[in-house]
Amino acid sequence: MVINTDTKIAKILKQNPAALEAIISITPKFEKLRNPLLRKLMAGRTSIGMASKISGCGINAFFDKLKPLGFEIDDNVITGKSEEKPHLPAFFNSLKPEQIIEFDVRPLIDADKDPLPLIVEKVKSIEKGQALKIINSFEPTPLLSLLKKQGFDSYVDTIDDQLVETYFYKTGNSAVEINTGENNNEGWDNYIKKFEGKMQTIDVRQLEMPGPMMAILDEINKLPADNALYVYHKRIPVFLLPELKEKKFDYRIKEISDGEVRLLIFKE
Amino acid sequence: MFPSSPTAGLAQNTSYKVVLPFYIYGALSFLIATILLLFSSSALVQHYFHPQTLAITHAMALGWGTMMILGASHQLVPVLIEGKLYSDALAYLSFLSAAIGIPLLVYGFYHFYFGWEAQWGAILINAAIVFYLINIAVSMIKSKKENVHAVFVFTATLWLLITIIVGLFLVFNFTHNILSQDSLHYLPLHAHLGIIGWFLLLVLGVASRLIPLFLISKYHNVKILWWIYGLVNFGLISFIVIFLYIGKSWLYFFPLSAILISIIMFGFFCKKAYLDRLRKKVDDQLKISLFSVLMMLLPLLVLLIIILMMLFSVDDPKLILTYGFCIFFGWITAIIFGMTFKTLPFILWNKAYHDKAGMGKTPNPRELFNNKIFQIMSVFYLAGFILLIAGILISNTFILKFAALLLVVTAFLYNTNVFKMIMHKPKKI
């Protein structure tokens, strides 16, 4: 596999799980990656370039460790950002203390929780002219790019290698639209948790039409009231949806890829 | 860098971007055809080979019937063959050629002027069907899954191509005498190739799939469908042979009987599916679709009378006009009404909510259109259609005008619902 500064850590780990130890050996800061939950959360959002900035280790430190594992390095894509401390942006000087909303995410990270949903909630409450100050132990690079798209200026103030303060300043009036898929109680993950141990499964991927619909309707007729039906499907069965509503069932759908869809069906 | 998984694209839906233009075009064509009808209702008391009648018929058959079917089948064929549409580009090309060609041709008929407009119109429509035929043929070859319904659709498309090639010759025959007889002589051939070969075969093939599906019926009978397929094709081919080479009126009973038996068999198929259904409550859209199955018998009854009269050398142009309008304003329009609201809401739901259905509650696809408007439309439609046929039979311009007005309202209500769905903004979840 060819990697460059933009390659996500998750892709590397997927290709070769041994890369995990190699990356952790660069600096103890990456010990967090040992935690499966944090690994899932961070690795998919972080590229080599970002990780190098967060940790303060050079990009080459990554390439040197990954090369022996069979990864090929593509030198053409080097994000040659200067490492100098950027100038203070204009908004920073005009901010009054009461316009700054502070949020320390370190306790969350230490408790192995994903801070993103809470950050998104805070971000949504920010009005024009206000700033959100995120206190963290590393530069939240994924968040920087996420919020840039939503019309935020940012400024990263690295106090020391254990304390980084990041300011997000809202410039536009538009409402923030970020979907983490996990910021409400109605989402897929929530229902999966809710019905843990109370799920029947059915795989209709091999059935010919209208087999899938028949099989699912048969199955939910037999379903105990507090259970959910987990369905492996090839596509979103749109014609099934009105039938479910009619039978007072609700559903959540997760698209895995083209031709791979999961459904969770439960009583309303 | 990342090898795609072997199942990628296997069950991919055709993009709504391919399908929607056809639906929008079809809906607007229907509105335009009814407005044309309102302004030329006096033409309907004259001979059926009247410029305005021909213009309306072609706006209905091509702009409304064919465009709606092309749109729906770009979506349905991949589902039937459990594959993927071969090319979106060919679908767009097909839409574009037909979209330009149909108004040119209709314009030519309306003014009974067969210059470059009508000729290019006919050529473009031929091109559109060739693009479509290539697209579904390659999709089917790639899928390698044989399926009786797909064979119906493919054969129907072949007949459509033959229909419009004949049509092309007829258009040129107006200005250059390329055929041995005048264009009026070949009209029955052209009309039946289209009505039986294209519309009937296609509708039977698709409806035999969709009706059990929507009824949630376990009934399945491939054998009867192959019989229907054989009978319809036999009927059409024997008609062509008799028409071109024998020309004895009484022989037409053979093709007519074959078609009649095939429709009765299809009615039997639908009845079985209906009795075996899991879904006890049948919705309005499905009711109108089932109703259209019965409506197929109406033109056949008229046709029977026409043939009987031919035996006694009585020629009644009114009956022939009734026959044509029963088909295009009756059967085909009813089936499209039913099927629009059985397909479009789902296509648009998928567009709006496929990536949101994991995050929270999503609306029922059926809520995307207004069922009240649908019901009012159905009432206007039935009244308009019955009066239209009555007006033709008794040659009354006043009734015809009134019927046309009811049909304009029908088309307006239909368009309201279609555009309501298309404009639907996804709800925040």
Image (cartoon, helix red, strand yellow):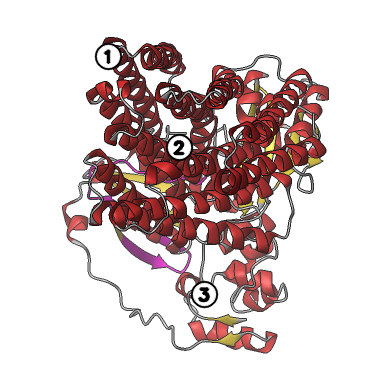
Q: Nearer the viewer, mark 2 or mark 1?
A: 1
Residue B82's label in the rendered image is: none
Which circle's residue, 2 or 1, is located before the other in the chain? 2
Range of the magenta residues? A155-181
User: Residue B320 in the image: x percent, y percent?
Assistant: 45, 27
Verify whether residue B16 appears in magenta: no
Q: Is residue A261 visible?
A: no
User: Residue B111 in the image: x percent, y percent?
Assistant: 21, 41
User: Residue A41 in the image: x percent, y percent?
Assistant: 58, 56
The answer for which chain carries disc 1 is B
Q: CA distance from mark 3 to mark 1?
A: 79 Å
User: What quarter of the picture does the C terminus of chain A occupy?
Assistant: top right
Q: Which residue is mark 2?
A: B65
- Report the side of B256 relative to B423 (left or right): right
Residue type for callout 2: Gly
In this picture, is B111 found above or below B117?
above
Q: Which residue is mark 3?
A: A48
- Report the side of A255 relative to B221 (left or right): left
